[in-house]
Image (cartoon, rainbow, N blue to C red):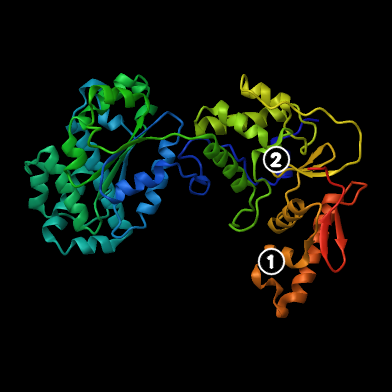
Amino acid sequence: MPVTLDDFLAYWGFHSHPFAAQRAGIDIATDVTFVRSPCFDWLLACCEDHESAIIFAGTGHGKTTLRQNIAVPLQLTMPVPLIITLDDFTAVLRSSSVTNVTIEDYLAVIRRLILERLAAQFIARPQTLALLHNDQHAYQDVLALTRHYVPLAARSLPEPPVETLKLVEANELHLGVRSWLNYLNTLVQAAGWERVICMVDCLDELDATLDPEQGLALLTPLLHAPWALHECGMTFVLFLSLALYNVMHERVLGRLDRTPHRVLTWDNKQLITVLNRRLEVASRPTGSATTSPSVHSFGELCALGAAVEPAICNAANGSPRRLLQLASQLIDQHLCHATTPSELLAHETIAAVLGDVELPQPQPEPLAGPPLFRLDRAGDIWIGAKRKNLNLPKNQRTILEMLWRAQPGRVSYHDLAVAVYGLHAWDRDVQDNTRETLQRMIKRLKITLEKDSSLEYIKLEPGHGYRLVNVVDS
């Protein structure tokens, strides 16, 4: 009988599919599973220093996830910036073609986003509107602007003065694009925010801009207005396709000599962290931030162990999104052949999904012999020729690793207690309780390791401590 996905997830302790969500915006645990790239701290510093910046990255390399998560620490600063996101270019395009978009089209969208955000904040937090009331001129202008440009969002706000509204409706403010951006930023500051941060994203997700030349044409009005990026009081952060990087350098567009910019890349170590963070979050009991997860790494699910993780990363070619897609495909392919939920992902399954990526060869079955204990370099536990999927609690894992490093010698009660409980563990007032608790913990570890085995692996030496026995010579 085939194994179902629910059976597989339940056996391994997952409360949800760790790889079901592969795109930013649909992952409800984005903040928990997010892994900081080297660009994160650099981009955060740019935003805090009021410097506009550009991030280049390939599709699926984490631009949107970076954007979503960079906003979290920015919202903890005081005063808080007003962050808007331009990730829907249909309004910029309107009826125009990509090549006919102007800076005025961008202004219209940015103005709408700012006013919608202000209106929502005024309704959710009336004290912000009360603060703005101290500046009557700014107060009246904001009410008139929101009423005119975003009437649905402004329905619950006070009516603006008739004369001010008439000026706005007649477009008699006589402001150019630069003045508009400066003015909007000034109104935001009058309402208590530090400034506007405008994040531009998803340009490479449009059908109309799959061709880098078309994407560049759509972006050109902003790139040809360096005063918008650097002199209007706002901070702009552009998340752009890697395909635009060389073109912008070659054509000297976007003032890259003046605008800080980085290329977002991932090495295998970082991708493995991305992969395994998903497993940890999905296998940690819901609502618990401290309980140890039941699965720490993808290697725990595979017959090849931790050696399979670099192979998946190589196949992902630096893309976190592709990495998660491959992991999901591996589980799907495994379930087509698995006969029990506990069955590990086989070498053949991994090879079928990853294709030409070089995989470590499975070790041949050794000749029958005693089931000796071994802890390999990846931390995997082996009893004889079988890799054991033992999700040991943190303290038991600490004890086992100490015993392994010490063998063939022993480890004293004192050293084990200090490693598990800290330096105070051997104080006289807690000594007896510590010894008793430690003994119970080691007994549980011993039972776990020796279950279904004919050999003993943890030996008590009364009055001295513990040592490992029946181990593979290292």
Q: Secondary structure at mark 1?
A: helix
Q: Residue at x 74, y 43 (%)?
A: 11
- Quadrant in the picture for residue 406: bottom right
Q: Residue at x 86, y 31 (%)?
A: 366
Left or right placement of residue 150 versus residue 402 in this view: left
Give the x, y percent position of residue 320.
51, 34
Q: Earlier in the sequence, mark 1 or mark 2?
A: 2
- Quadrant in the picture for residue 346: top right
The disc placed on residue 316 is none
Which corner quadrant holds the N terminus?
top right
Give the x, y percent position of residue 242.
37, 27
Q: Indicate the amino acid at tag 2.
A: Glu
Q: Indicate the amino acid at tag 1.
A: Val
Give the x, y percent position of residue 414.
74, 68
Visible in this render: residue 155? no
Q: Nearer the viewer, residue 301 or 25?
A: 301
- Quadrant in the picture for residue 100: top left
In this view, the mark in front (1 or 2): 1
Give the x, y percent position of residue 114.
25, 46
Report the residue that reaches farthest toward the front: 409
Mark 1 crowdedness (10 Å alpha carbons): few <14, some 14-19, many ≥20: some
Visible in this render: residue 270? yes
Q: Secondary structure at mark 2?
A: helix
Q: Residue at x 29, y 53 (%)?
A: 81
Which corner quadrant holds the C terminus?
top right
Residue matched to label 2: 300
Residue matched to label 1: 418
